[in-house]
């Protein structure tokens, strides 16, 4: 017992000193990127406000490769039509990679939709959309991105809703060479967001407020002062240093998670680019392989 506790402590201290464990207050990990006057701090809660003057957004202070990022969000209550709240990771530059959650508001009583997208080397067009199995405006729910060399997993309350699998062996590029920042924002997107843009934002219901808490980033930190190649090298597991996200059990979903994903796709998915033959007469290559 004592030995295992000691071992645990040694491992834990080693992980902390590598900068891997980081569950923290907003200000430790993030900073506002625009409209600071649309931020409200209430104890452990952060509120972002959208009104007819401005939205608001924040970004992580550092960039990361691999690991897991989670935030708890309570989305805009009541009439949120026309508003979008986004939570995403993105690298910089024209060939950037990006993993997106976009929460699309709706009129009172109609379901919020969650749109996800994956950009690889600057190219997106991989939208999926689902209506959640709960009302995301009454309580906090956790939204996470898990990322390693094998897969990118989008999770809602730890239930996987999307997996983007590494299929480099089929010649399909996978995002694993660029450090990414973590971002969130709220803005007006009533030209497209709600019921295809038919329902506009009703500004008499402003301000629209998204509330956040429990910010967690457990990844390999890539300081901007360090060259990209050196960061990339540091973030790959080696004989001396094995990162938790590189454990073999995390190279794909476990059986329980695979069942959860099937359930989400069968019961809650309302749009999948892979099956949109009007838009893609030829099925995108990764979709062909995803079916197997
Ligand atoms: C809003 O509600 C309508 C009607 O229930 C639904 O068709 C739509 O998917 C919902 N979400 C958005 C973003 O329009
Ligand atoms: C913003 O909305 C408020 C409340 O509806 C309204 O009084 C004001 O004129 C609007 N301002 C602008 C710039 O549209």
Image (tube, grey):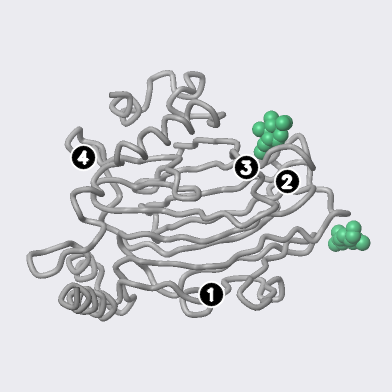
* Label 2 SS: loop
Q: Judge depth for marks 4 and 1 and give the one in front.
A: 1
Res 134 label: 3
Q: Judge depth for marks 1 and 3 and give the one in front.
A: 3
Image coordinates for residue 132, horizontal then vertical, percent = 59, 40
Among the two numbered marks 2 and 1 on one chain, the one whose residue lies closer to the N terminus: 1
Residue visible at 75% across and 53% down in the picture: 77
Q: CA distance from mark 3 to mark 2?
A: 20 Å
Say which residue label 2 marks: 82
Among the two numbered marks 1 and 3 on one chain, the one whose residue lies closer to the N terminus: 1
130 on left or right of 168 = right
The one nearer the camera, 217 or 118, is 217
Quadrant of the image containing the C terminus: top left
Among the two numbered marks 3 and 4 on one chain, the one whose residue lies closer to the N terminus: 3
Residue visible at 25% across and 68% down in the picture: 228
* Label 4 SS: helix
Image coordinates for residue 73, horizontal then vertical, percent = 59, 58
Q: CA distance from mark 4 to mark 2?
A: 38 Å
Say which residue label 1 marks: 26
Q: CA distance from mark 2 to mark 1?
A: 27 Å
Say which residue label 4 marks: 168
Q: Residues within 10 Å of mark 3 (few under 14, many from 20)?
A: few
């Amino acid at each position: 017992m004592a030995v295992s506790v000691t071992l645990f402590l040694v491992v834990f201290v080693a992980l902390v000193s590598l900068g891997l464990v980081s569950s923290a207050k907003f200000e430790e990990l993030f900073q506002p990127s625009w409209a600071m006057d649309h931020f409200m701090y209430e104890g452990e809660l952060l509120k972002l406000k959208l009104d007819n003057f401005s939205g608001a957004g924040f970004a992580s202070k550092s960039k990361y490769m691999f690991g897991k990022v989670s935030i708890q969000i309570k989305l805009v209550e009541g009439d949120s039509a026309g508003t979008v709240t986004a939570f995403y990771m993105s690298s910089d530059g024209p060939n950037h990679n990006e993993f997106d959650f976009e929460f699309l508001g709706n009129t009172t009583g109609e379901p919020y939709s969650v749109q996800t997208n994956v950009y690889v080397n600057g190219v997106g067009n991989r939208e999926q959309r689902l209506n959640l199995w709960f009302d995301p405006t009454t309580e906090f729910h956790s939204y996470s991105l898990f990322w390693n060399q094998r897969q990118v997993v989008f999770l809602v309350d730890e239930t996987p809703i999307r997996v983007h699998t590494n299929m480099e062996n089929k010649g399909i590029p996978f995002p694993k060479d660029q450090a990414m920042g973590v971002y969130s924002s709220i803005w007006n997107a009533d030209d497209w967001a709600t019921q295809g843009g038919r329902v506009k934002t009703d500004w008499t219901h402003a301000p629209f407020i998204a509330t956040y808490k429990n910010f967690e980033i457990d990844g390999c930190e890539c300081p901007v002062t360090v060259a990209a190649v050196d960061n990339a090298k540091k973030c790959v597991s080696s004989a001396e240093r094995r990162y938790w996200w590189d454990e073999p059990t995390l190279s794909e979903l476990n059986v329980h998670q695979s069942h959860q994903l099937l359930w989400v796709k069968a019961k809650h998915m309302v749009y999948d680019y892979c099956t949109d033959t009007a838009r893609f007469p030829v099925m995108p290559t990764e979709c062909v392989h995803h079916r197997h």
